[in-house]
Protein backbone atom coordinates (compact mmCIF):
# COMPACT_ATOMS: atom_id res chain seq x y z
CA UNK A 1 0.00 0.00 0.00
CA UNK A 2 1.42 3.37 -0.97
CA UNK A 3 1.91 6.16 1.48
CA UNK A 4 -0.58 8.95 0.75
CA UNK A 5 2.32 11.40 0.51
CA UNK A 6 6.08 11.14 0.40
CA UNK A 7 8.28 13.73 2.06
CA UNK A 8 10.73 14.48 -0.73
CA UNK A 9 8.31 14.18 -3.64
CA UNK A 10 7.87 17.38 -5.67
CA UNK A 11 4.41 16.36 -6.93
CA UNK A 12 3.24 15.58 -3.36
CA UNK A 13 4.34 19.14 -2.53
CA UNK A 14 2.25 20.48 -5.41
CA UNK A 15 -0.76 18.46 -4.14
CA UNK A 16 -0.19 19.91 -0.66
CA UNK A 17 0.12 23.47 -2.04
CA UNK A 18 3.66 23.76 -0.67
CA UNK A 19 5.08 24.65 -4.07
CA UNK A 20 3.16 26.53 -6.76
CA UNK A 21 1.79 25.07 -9.97
CA UNK A 22 -0.57 26.28 -12.67
CA UNK A 23 -3.50 24.00 -11.90
CA UNK A 24 -5.99 23.60 -14.75
CA UNK A 25 -8.31 20.99 -13.18
CA UNK A 26 -8.70 19.36 -9.82
CA UNK A 27 -10.91 16.57 -8.48
CA UNK A 28 -11.10 14.91 -5.09
CA UNK A 29 -8.39 12.45 -6.11
CA UNK A 30 -6.49 14.03 -9.04
CA UNK A 31 -4.77 17.26 -10.04
CA UNK A 32 -3.87 18.51 -13.53
CA UNK A 33 -1.28 21.27 -13.93
CA UNK A 34 0.90 22.74 -16.66
CA UNK A 35 4.35 21.21 -17.16
CA UNK A 36 7.05 23.68 -16.12
CA UNK A 37 9.10 22.78 -19.23
CA UNK A 38 6.49 22.32 -21.97
CA UNK A 39 7.32 20.09 -24.93
CA UNK A 40 4.20 21.04 -26.92
CA UNK A 41 1.82 24.02 -27.17
CA UNK A 42 -0.35 22.24 -24.62
CA UNK A 43 1.57 20.17 -22.06
CA UNK A 44 -0.35 19.26 -18.91
CA UNK A 45 0.47 16.62 -16.29
CA UNK A 46 -2.37 14.70 -14.65
CA UNK A 47 -1.47 13.05 -11.34
CA UNK A 48 -3.20 11.17 -8.54
CA UNK A 49 -3.08 13.00 -5.22
CA UNK A 50 -1.93 9.76 -3.59
CA UNK A 51 1.72 8.90 -4.06
CA UNK A 52 2.61 5.96 -6.26
CA UNK A 53 6.03 5.76 -7.91
CA UNK A 54 4.72 5.09 -11.41
CA UNK A 55 1.60 4.28 -13.43
CA UNK A 56 1.97 0.51 -13.10
CA UNK A 57 2.16 0.67 -9.32
CA UNK A 58 -0.88 2.96 -9.30
CA UNK A 59 -2.87 0.64 -11.57
CA UNK A 60 -1.97 -2.42 -9.48
CA UNK A 61 -3.06 -0.77 -6.23
CA UNK A 62 -5.98 1.40 -7.37
CA UNK A 63 -7.15 0.59 -10.90
CA UNK A 64 -10.10 2.96 -10.73
CA UNK A 65 -7.76 5.81 -9.82
CA UNK A 66 -5.50 4.91 -12.74
CA UNK A 67 -8.55 5.05 -15.01
CA UNK A 68 -9.47 8.43 -13.53
CA UNK A 69 -6.18 9.84 -14.87
CA UNK A 70 -7.31 8.97 -18.39
CA UNK A 71 -10.78 10.44 -17.82
CA UNK A 72 -9.25 13.62 -16.47
CA UNK A 73 -6.74 13.83 -19.34
CA UNK A 74 -9.65 13.69 -21.79
CA UNK A 75 -11.48 16.40 -19.83
CA UNK A 76 -8.40 18.63 -19.90
CA UNK A 77 -7.98 17.99 -23.64
CA UNK A 78 -11.58 19.12 -24.19
CA UNK A 79 -11.09 22.23 -22.04
CA UNK A 80 -7.84 23.06 -23.84
CA UNK A 81 -9.65 22.59 -27.16
CA UNK A 82 -7.27 19.95 -28.49
CA UNK A 83 -9.68 17.00 -28.34
CA UNK A 84 -10.49 17.26 -32.04
CA UNK A 85 -7.04 18.14 -33.36
CA UNK A 86 -5.60 15.26 -31.34
CA UNK A 87 -3.33 14.70 -28.41
CA UNK A 88 -0.87 12.20 -27.02
CA UNK A 89 -0.77 10.62 -23.56
CA UNK A 90 2.58 9.42 -22.24
CA UNK A 91 3.50 7.53 -19.07
CA UNK A 92 7.28 7.36 -18.62
CA UNK A 93 8.24 4.49 -16.33
CA UNK A 94 11.79 4.21 -15.03
CA UNK A 95 14.81 6.43 -15.44
CA UNK A 96 15.79 4.54 -18.59
CA UNK A 97 12.56 5.74 -20.22
CA UNK A 98 13.10 9.32 -19.10
CA UNK A 99 11.09 9.32 -15.87
CA UNK A 100 12.47 12.04 -13.62
CA UNK A 101 9.65 12.49 -11.09
CA UNK A 102 8.75 9.26 -9.32
CA UNK A 103 5.12 10.13 -8.59
CA UNK A 104 2.73 8.62 -11.16
CA UNK A 105 1.71 11.08 -13.86
CA UNK A 106 0.47 11.15 -17.41
CA UNK A 107 1.72 13.75 -19.88
CA UNK A 108 -1.00 15.27 -22.07
CA UNK A 109 0.63 16.74 -25.17
CA UNK A 110 -1.15 18.49 -27.99
CA UNK A 111 -1.61 21.62 -29.99
CA UNK A 112 -0.65 22.81 -33.39
CA UNK A 113 1.91 20.61 -35.21
CA UNK A 114 3.33 19.32 -31.93
CA UNK A 115 3.74 15.77 -33.24
CA UNK A 116 6.02 16.54 -36.16
CA UNK A 117 9.36 14.83 -35.64
CA UNK A 118 8.06 12.60 -32.84
CA UNK A 119 7.64 8.83 -33.04
P1 LIG B 1 8.87 12.57 -16.38
O1 LIG B 1 10.15 12.86 -17.12
O2 LIG B 1 7.92 11.70 -17.12
O3 LIG B 1 9.15 12.08 -14.97
O4 LIG B 1 8.13 13.96 -16.28
C1 LIG B 1 8.28 14.85 -15.22
C2 LIG B 1 7.81 16.16 -15.73
O5 LIG B 1 7.58 17.00 -14.62
C3 LIG B 1 8.79 16.89 -16.65
O6 LIG B 1 8.20 17.12 -17.92
C4 LIG B 1 9.08 18.20 -15.90
O7 LIG B 1 9.21 19.31 -16.77
C5 LIG B 1 7.86 18.32 -15.00
N1 LIG B 1 8.06 19.08 -13.78
C6 LIG B 1 9.06 18.96 -12.87
N2 LIG B 1 8.88 19.81 -11.85
C7 LIG B 1 7.74 20.48 -12.10
C8 LIG B 1 7.01 21.51 -11.43
N3 LIG B 1 7.43 22.02 -10.26
N4 LIG B 1 5.87 21.98 -11.99
C9 LIG B 1 5.44 21.48 -13.17
N5 LIG B 1 6.07 20.51 -13.86
C10 LIG B 1 7.20 20.03 -13.34
Image: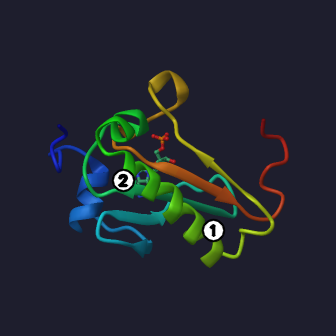
Q: In this view, does 83 lie to the left or right of 77?
A: right
Q: In which quarter of the image is the C terminus?
A: top right
Residue 56 position within the rendered picture, expressed as x and y whole percent measured from the top left = 41, 34
Residue 41 position within the rendered picture, expressed as x and y whole percent measured from the top left = 69, 64
Q: Which residue: 65% across, 56% down?
A: 109
N-terminal label among 2 and 1: 2
Q: Quadrant of residue 16?
A: bottom left
Q: Do the residues labelled 2 and 1 touch (CB within 8 Å)?
A: no
Q: Is residue 85 visible?
A: yes
Residue under circle 2?
A: 65
Q: Is ligand 1 less than 8 Å from the beta carbon at label 1?
A: no
Q: How crowded is mark 2: few (under 14 residues within 10 Å), some or many (20 or more)?
A: some
Q: Is residue 53 left or right of residue 25?
A: left
Q: Is mark 1 on a helix, strand or loop?
A: helix
Q: Which residue: 81% across, 66% down?
A: 85
Q: Which of 39 and 54 is in front in this view?
A: 54
Q: In which quarter of the image is the N terminus?
A: top left
Q: Which residue: 35% across, 72% down?
A: 27
Q: Which of 59 and 111 is in front in this view?
A: 59
Q: In this view, does 82 lie above or below 44?
A: below
Residue under circle 1?
A: 77
Q: Which residue: 38% across, 73% down?
A: 26
Q: How crowded is mark 1: few (under 14 residues within 10 Å), some or many (20 or more)?
A: many
Q: What element carries label 2?
A: helix
Amino acid sequence: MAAPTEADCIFCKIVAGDIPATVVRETERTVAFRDINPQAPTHVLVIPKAHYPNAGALAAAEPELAAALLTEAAEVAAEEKIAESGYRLIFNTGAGAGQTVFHAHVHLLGGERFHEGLV
